[in-house]
Structures are given as C-alpha cells and as structure tokens.
Amino acid sequence: MTMTIRELCDSSTTEHVHQGALVGGFYVGISLLEENSSIEECCTFHGSFAKLNARTSAIVWQTFMLLDNNDSRGEYARAAVWGSSLSIDINRNQVYIATGNLFSARERILQCQEEENNQTVPTHPDQCVEPDNHSKSMLALDLDSREIEWYRQLGGYYVWFVACNNLSTPDCPPRPNLDADFGEAPMMLSSFINRTKQDLLATVRKSGFTWEAGPGSIGGEGIWGAATDEMRIYTNIANGDQKNFTLKPSDKNTTAGGWVAMDASTGKILWSTANPSNALASGPVTMANNVLIGRSMYKTRPVYAMHVGTGEILWSYETGASFFGGVSVSDGCVYVGYTSSIGSLNPSSTGRTSLFAFCF
C-alpha cells in the first residue's frame, strides 16, 4: 500500500519527507524548500515528525514543532525536521530529533528581538523564545504517545530564509538572520565522564558548533550528518563562505572545508583535516573499521577516506558528480551513490544515476 507525501504534509507543494527509521513503525521528519520564497510570500510551513504504520502506511501520529499558524503569514513558520538518520532509544521508548530555524515569527516576537538588539546585555533566559517554539532544538518524543518528553532550545531567536541572506534587503526580520540550524538528527552514544558511564546525544549545527546532551547535563557548518564510534564524534565543516578555518589542535588555517574529530566525553578537538582539493566539504561522514569517509564539492567530486585516529587521508577517488546521501558500508565494501541536484540552493551540484562500490 502506498501513501502520498501530501497525506503527511500541508498545502505546500515544496514539502519533503526526510530521514526514516523502522522500529515498530516507520518514523519520518517533514521538511520543505519554501525558503526560496520572496519576502512577500514567505512563509506558512511548520515542520513535523510522524509515525506511520509500516504495513498499511496509515498515519499513527504526527507531532508539530510549532503552534498552528492556520496557513496565515506573519505567524510562526518552518522548524523543519530533516537531515541524517534518526536515533531510536528502545530502552527509554523515545526517538530523538533536531529541528531547523524559523522562517517567520509573530509580530510581538519580532518586536521583542528589536528590543533585544538595542540592549547592551541580552536577557537570560531569552525572552524572545516561547516554550512552544521548538525551532533549533533537540527533542525526545515518546514512540507510542507522540508526546514531547523533553526538549532543549539551542540557538535562541533566528529567523532566516534565502531572500534575507543579503542583510541590506528591506523588510527582513530583525537580526540575527543566520542559516545556522540543525541539519542532522542527534546521535546516541555512551561515554565515561568523571569515571561514570553516561548515555549521551550529540549533534552538529550548521554554524559548526557541536552540542552534546545527557541525563541532567549538556555539554562554519556541520551539515547532513555526523558520525560516532562512541570514543570520538566526527563531522564535516562545509565552510561555504570560505572563512578562515583553524585546523585545531594545530594553528594552521585553510579557507576550504574539512573534517574534524572530537573526544566524545569532553568535546576536545583531536584532529582537523583540510579538504585537499581546496573546496567545500559537504555531505554526511561515515565511519567503519577505523576509517572515516568524507566528500568534496570540488569539480571532480572526490571522496576521501581518513584514519579515524589521526585524520590522515588514506585514499581518494574522483566520482564526477554531487552526492549528499550517506555512504553505506557492508562486508568490506563502501557503497557511494549519487543523484542529487538541488538547484538554486547549490547551483554547482550535478545529478547522475550511478553507484560506486569500493571493496577491500
């Protein structure tokens, strides 16, 4: 039995089903491409997360990340749920997700931010973030009841869409206008902290900041998906604006993208490797058998394999086309497929229909 995307989405024609996990049901996040709208047209979409019956495709439940805006502009919009594969915690009966930024907010919230911008010291906690605003957040949802068991807002006020990428554009929401939301789901891992083993969640934001949360504590662009072996957390740094990127723990710099490994228990940066092709480093990373796989947006679209302990590049291959999906590893083989062409969001992306297998 087939269910159309429209049964899960609202009236928008640009919405997409993202992620996906199958444990007693099929769990998916809902996102969109409404961010290309003009200032006059933006925006009404509000992100959600849903559980489907794996046999019939019927919607079991759907939880929205924002209050209902009744398809009206000038209200809360976006907070999409998108990115990498979901984390499901069977022991706690929870699924963990992270959300995108706002595209619009209520007038009183915009006025609140204008007042915040005029203050020398911002208010704490942030008065411009309401409890039901689950944008830029990590959340835990009950697998059966759909209830939000806990959430943590990790970014404050951010309203951004493409038309306001130029800060001089009139009629845009008050600053900060940053595309710095979560582009991946949290990863589950266990690590020893002060000699006590704790279950943790880790996720990377587009700003390049990595967040880690555990029971009772919380520890230029990480996008599409990080990886972990429970000792380290690995992420790409796309560096789309080609800013100076310090390759910590060294003092060397690059304006390219790259890859970073952090200690899972402390967040300390263990190594950083610059993209050898001096280009963006988009796409999720994959770790298996002490090897980390990353990819480059250089014109020949190379894929790189690195040693997880040192970041040393072990081998590379030029694929010839863009690919933003994850790399799969099975029985000694690394599988890389590509079909992605995401248009105005990345004009240099290309689409083909091939699959590579690297076997060792």
Image: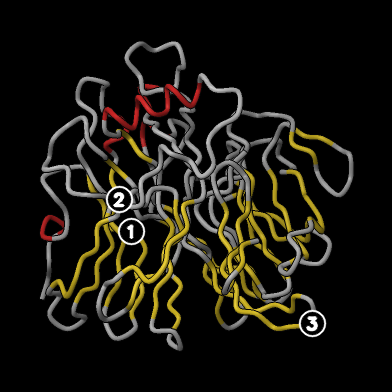
Residue 334's image quarter?
A: bottom right
Q: Is residue 340 above or below residue 171?
A: below
Horizontal and vertical percent position of residue 115 = 44, 23
Q: Secondary structure at mark 1?
A: strand
Q: Is residue 2 above or below residue 254?
A: below
Query: Which amino acid type corresponds to the residue marked 1 in the rendered image?
Result: His
Distance from Cα at disc 2 to Cα at disc 1: 7 Å
Image quadrant occupied by the N terminus:
bottom left
Q: Residue at x 25, y 57 (%)?
A: 64
Q: Residue at x 22, y 49 (%)?
A: 67
| Nearer to the camera, 247 or 160 | 160
Query: Residue most toward the bottom?
Result: 91
| Mark 2 / mark 1, whichever is N-terminal | 1
Packing grade of label 3 (10 A; few <14, some 14-19, many >=20) is: few
Q: Which mark is residue 354?
A: none
Q: Is residue 94 above or below residue 238?
A: below
Packing grade of label 1 (10 A; few <14, some 14-19, many >=20) is: some
Q: Where does label 1 land, which residue?
A: 18
Q: Secondary structure at mark 3?
A: loop
Q: Are marks 2 and 1 in contact (CB under 8 Å)?
A: yes
| Mark 2 / mark 3, whichever is N-terminal | 2
Query: Which amino acid type corresponds to the residue marked 3 in the rendered image?
Result: Arg
Q: Residue at x 27, y 50 (%)?
A: 66
Packing grade of label 2 (10 A; few <14, some 14-19, many >=20) is: many
Q: Where does label 3 land, which residue?
A: 195
| Nearer to the camera, 326 or 53 | 53
| Mark 3 / mark 1, whichever is N-terminal | 1
Horizontal and vertical percent position of residue 132 = 31, 52
Query: Which amino acid type corresponds to the residue marked 2 in the rendered image?
Result: Ser
